[in-house]
Each structure stands twice: as structure tokens, then as C-alpha cells.
Amino acid sequence: MTGTVSKLAAPRPAAPPRPPAALRSAALAFAPSARGVRVSLAGRARSPIIAMASAKEGNGAPTKKTRLHDLYELQGLSPWYDNLCRPVTDLLPLIASGVRGVTSNPTIFQKAISSSSAYDEQFKQLISSGKDAESAYWELVIKDIQDACKLFEPIYDETDGADGYVSVEVSPRLANDTQGTVEAAKWLHKVVNRPNVYIKIPATAECVPSIREVISNGISVNVTLIFSIARYEAVIDAYLDGLEASGLSDLSRVTSVASFFVSRVDSLIDKMLEKIGTPEALALRGKAAVAQAKLANQLYQKKFSGPRWEALAKKGAKKQRLLWASTGVKNPAYPDTLYVDSLIGPDTVNTMPDQALQAFIDHGTVSRTVDANVSEAEGVYSALEKLGINWDEVGKQLELEGVDSFKKSFDSLLVSLQEKGNTLKTANV
């Protein structure tokens, strides 16, 4: 890649980008099928989300209500969508089917921008105006985030700021840069300029202090790439410390989610168990991720209670909700709703990629499970330790892999944008 890269991996904040053009109205098509209601956008090329009705009207016709609505209304879990691309109005039928927020990451944007022509016109304008590839990248991303925030604003307003968030991540190149992450988070918060944006910060050792500082500045944060209970506790403490250090008398508008990754844990530990190869080890396959997640929920209950939390709650502080991430099932031998069905409970979020979302709408089970069979989860966790599996080492490896994956996606996209920009400049000579 040619050219220099700024420390923030973002254009310098001279002035916020122009506000997005008014969102065009979407044509929603509800085509009844034998299995439920097929929700799609007219002309949409990608596979439609199938919204299975969980209730029927008196005449037997399917309603628009889905299991996603039931998750929130009956169990207090907010279903979010782990994807974002243009046209952003593709989110409208998902919102109608019960989606209450959106998460994005560098890999999601790499796929969106590199595989779609929807970004070409804005990119050409940016390059023609003298922007470099990296500055152009951030303006493309910021427009998507702003437009998505507008769609979810009604949910944000209806819940008094408890839901309806859209997440955007700081550059993955800053995963080991404490102060660089703080500056990037402040910059993103300023230029997106929406009340319902979450700035995503990775839970690396170097960025845990960044989380505290960003929260203390009154900026809401989605803490991502959490793979172990020890690191999760450090993240909770950073949130509480940040609230206390903010000096704000009203803490109600500073919120956070802690994105605890699930399926990747099973992917790694299952390989370890297969290498051990004993019947005892093999019997534990597919159980590690949910067990650890349930214990994380127990820690959440403990940390967000007692005198320290009560003092913050009196100032309007909201609990840092657990967000279950990486919930797409990677092993076809496991049920395709495993990482949704097994972790349902109040004050939680589950961000689902397309397949997991479709599967749950179609045949998921809406039942409180996150605090069921906790003793069994403790037994699985301990049994894995006895087999020689070190949970902290698992967390460190998965964190390194996660950061590296996002860096590769980010770098790959910038290279392709640089090449596209050079081509456009040559064509205009």
C-alpha cells in the first residue's frame, strides 16, 4: 500500500462530514409462504429474511410478529443484527421483524464496500475532491452509520436511550494503542454526531484503560472482542471507573454493552478436546462457549449490584449489558440456534448474522435459559480446566486472532480502495 497512514487511521477532524441525504423510502414486500411471512425489499438481491409468525390473527393469516419480538417482550433480550451495507434501508424490514440495533466491524465493511457498487459514486466524489483512500473509507463508513442511526432513532427514543444503537469500530490498527484509541473514539463520536451510536473499542489489555477514559468523557461504548471472564471483569471495572470519573450528575445517557464472544470459543476448544481424544474430552465438545457465557452472566449479576452500583444507579447510570457476539454456529453438527437459544435472559443483547437470525425466526425457542443449569456450566468449566485447558490462554489466543482478522480486513480494503482511487485518477488525466 502506498502513501502514509495516520496514527488514528482516520482523516483529521477538520470538520464533520456533511449530513447524509434524506433516506429514500423503502418498498416492503410481504409475500406469504407455506412456512410464514417472507420479508424482503423489492428488488433486493440477497437472500430475504424469513419472518416466521409466532402468533396468528383470527382468520388464520400470519401476522408480522416474530420470535424476535417475543425475545424482547417476553424475555427482555434485545435482538440486534450483525451486518450493515448499502442500501441501509434494507434494515427496514428487519426492524419490522423485531431487530432493535446493529453492529458492524472492519470485516463487515470490507465485504460491503468491496462487493457492492453502491459505494462507487460517493467514493469517486471523495477521490475527485482530493481525499486519500483512508479518508474516503471513513467517510463511506460514517455515512452508513449515520443513516442507520436515523432508522433506529425511534427505538432509542421509545426506550429512553436503552436500545436502538448502531456500533462503529475504531481502527483495528489501534488495538494496542491506548491513547490512539481514546483519540479515535472521540473523533468518531464527534463526526458521527448521533445520540444512538456506540463506539466499539476492543477489550485488549492496552485498550481497557481507553474504555475507562472514553466513558468518563460521556461517550457510549460497545466493548468488543471479549473472550474470557477475567478480561470481562476488567471491562466492567473500566465502565464503573469511567462513570465515577465522569463527574456527571446525570449518567443516564452514557451507556455501554460488553460484547462477549461465543462460537469462536467452541471452535478453538473443540480442537483441543479432539487432540486430547479421551471419551471424557470428546463428551465436552460444544459445551465450553455456553458454559463460560453463563458464568459471565453470573459475574454481571454480582458486579451490577451492591453499594457501589447503587450509588451510580441513583445518578441514572444504566447497567453495561452483556451482548452475545459471534453467535453464528460454525460447526454444522450443532443446532443452528445454539448460541441464541442457550443464552436468553433479561437485560442482554444478542447480535446475530444473517443465518442465525433467519434460523431463530424460523425455529428458535423463546425461553429463559441464561441463568438455568448454572451448576452444570460450572462443572463444564472446571472439567475443561482439569483436562489442561487454560481459559486465560484460550482468551488471549482468540483475542489475537480476532484483532489480526480485523486488521487484515481493514488493510485489504484500504489497498483495494487505493488501487481503485489510482485508476480513477489515471482515467481523469
Image (cartoon, rainbow, N blue to C red):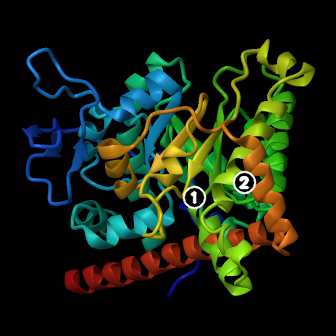
Residue 56 numbered mark, or none: none
Q: Splitting the image into 4 quarters, where does residue 353 fall? A: bottom left
Give the answer, above or below, for where 294 lies relative to 196.
Answer: below
Which residue matches tag 2? 292
User: In screen coordinates, is 22 left or right of 251?
Assistant: left
Is residue 130 visible to us here?
Answer: yes
Q: What residue do we see at 23% from left, 46% from top?
A: 50
Closer to the camera, 66 or 13? 66
Q: Given contact means CB atoms under 8 Å apart, are the residues at marks 2 and 1 in contact? A: no
Closer to the camera, 421 or 207? 207
Which residue matches tag 1? 12
Q: Amino acid at mark 2?
A: Gln
Give the answer, above or below, for where 341 lies relative to 250.
Answer: below
Number of residues whose C-alpha sits closer than 10 Å to that of mark 2, classed few (under 14), some (14–19) or many (20 or more) = many
User: In screen coordinates, is 372 left or right of 228?
Assistant: left
Q: What residue do we see at 69% from left, 24% from top?
A: 318
Number of residues whose C-alpha sits closer than 10 Å to that of mark 1, classed few (under 14), some (14–19) or many (20 or more) = few
Q: Percent from the top left, x then y, of residue 347? A: 61, 29
Give the answer, above or below, for where 129 lies relative to 43.
Answer: below
Mark with earlier residue (2, 1): 1
Q: Percent from the top left, x then y, of residue 101? A: 44, 38
Measure the alpha-carbon separation of dots 2 and 1: 41 Å
Q: Splitting the image into 4 quarters, where does residue 180 fall? A: bottom right
Disc 2 element: helix
Number of on-image labels: 2
Q: Residue furthest front?
A: 279
Q: What residue do we see at 9% from left, 43% from top?
A: 33
Q: Percent from the top left, x then y, of residue 399? A: 70, 68
User: In screen coordinates, is 166 left or right of 151?
Assistant: right
Q: What residue do we see at 90% from left, 24% from top?
A: 308
Q: Percent from the top left, x then y, of residue 360? A: 37, 46
